[in-house]
Image (cartoon, grey):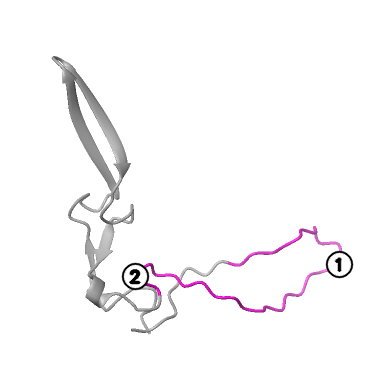
Amino acid sequence: MLAGRGGKAGAVEKCTTCRGSGVQVRVQQLGPGFIQQMQSVCSECDGQGERINPKDRCKECQGRKITRERKVLEVHIDKGTFSRPAISFTVVRCHCGL
């Protein structure tokens, strides 16, 4: 089990394009004394700040560290509890193997 790493142990490395910040900053000179600074999500790591070598990525989650699955959960709701049409649960771990 990979325990939410998205790949083999030691395969996760800091993105060299954005230096781990997840953001690329571009500076453009518009004219003498005028500069423009633009900030965008890093295209190399998709804003995560880290990357995993494609050959070391988990085959099920593709290095995203999360898998999508449906489960039936039994939940006890006390009488008088505020009602909503749905209760959502989020799991932020990759439960897959290589």
- Is disc 2 surrounded by few (<14), some (14 to 19) or many (20+) residues within 10 Å? many
| Outermost residue to the top | 32
Q: Residue 14 carries which label?
A: none
**Which residue in the structure is indicated by mark 1?**
79
Q: Report the Cα–Cα distance between label 1 and label 2.
A: 42 Å
Regarding mark 2 in the picture, which secondary structure is present there? loop
Instruction: Give how far across and how far down residue 55 sits, in percent.
Output: 23, 76
- Name the amino acid, label 1: Lys
Identify whether 44 is placed above or below 12: above
The foreground one among 82 and 40 is 40
Q: Residue at x 35, y 72 (%)?
A: 62
Instruction: Give how far across and how far down residue 88 sits, in percent.
Output: 64, 64
- Name the amino acid, label 2: Gly
Instruction: Give how far across and how far down residue 95 sits, in percent.
Output: 44, 79
Tag 2 or tag 1, which sits nearer the N-term?
Answer: 2
* Residue 79 part of the magenta segment: yes
**Which residue in the structure is indicated by mark 2?**
63
Regarding mark 1 in the picture, which secondary structure is present there? loop
The foreground one among 12 and 35 is 35
Q: Which residue is drawn at 33% across and 54% down?
A: 46
Identify whether 93 is placed above or below 37: below
Residue range (magenta):
61-89
